[in-house]
Image (spheres, rainbow, N blue to C red):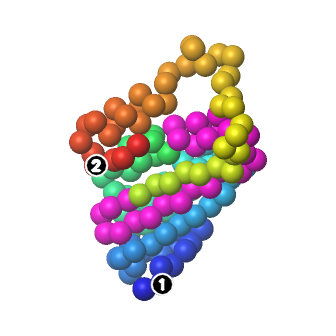
Amino acid sequence: MKRPLHDSPRVAFTNAPHVIWRKEFPAVEISVPEARAWAGSVLSVGGPPSFLDDVLLLLSEVVTNAITHSDSRRVTVQITRTGTTVQVEVTDAGSSTTACRTRPDARRRRRPGAVVGGIARRGMGILP
């Protein structure tokens, strides 16, 4: 079965039991709210899922992590929805040999891993 791949929210979930959206963003901070807005629009087709806020929070954390800690120029977000199941993947093209970058103010900021892990532990069926 060939799966449709979309970068816009034009396909209603009621008409497509398995839908994949993919979009690339530049690896800059402004891409975090842009990725959230895009994901919110594609996931709201046919009515937003009850877990939309959790998905958008996790997406923000993971996109921020990819931008902050990689040398990649692009970040790709892929969202797969089958019925009531949503899978979100965030990838970057950073080198596997590049050392992880840490911001000078990183100690004063909250830890993204704690947010991702906290939502996963709530029993939402979300895998970090």
Q: Which residue is mark 2?
A: 125
15 above or below 64? below
Question: Which residue occupies the extreme left position in the image?
Answer: 123
- Give the number of the disc on residue 95: none
Check if mark 2's residue and mark 1's residue have beta carbons within 8 Å.
Answer: no
Q: Residue at x 69, y 32 (%)?
A: 99
Count the numbered circles shown.
Answer: 2
- Rendering quarter of residue 87: bottom left
31 above or below 103? below
Measured as percent of width and height from the top left, residue 70 is found at 68, 38
- In the figure, is residue 105 to the left or right of 19? right
- Disc 2 residue type (three-letter): Gly
Binning the other alpha carbons within 10 Å of mark 1 as few (below 14), some (14 to 19) or many (20 upward) gives: few
34 above or below 84? above
Q: Is any atom of residue 37 visible in this view?
A: no
Secondary structure beneath dot 2 equals loop
User: Is residue 34 part of the magenta span, yes or no?
Assistant: no
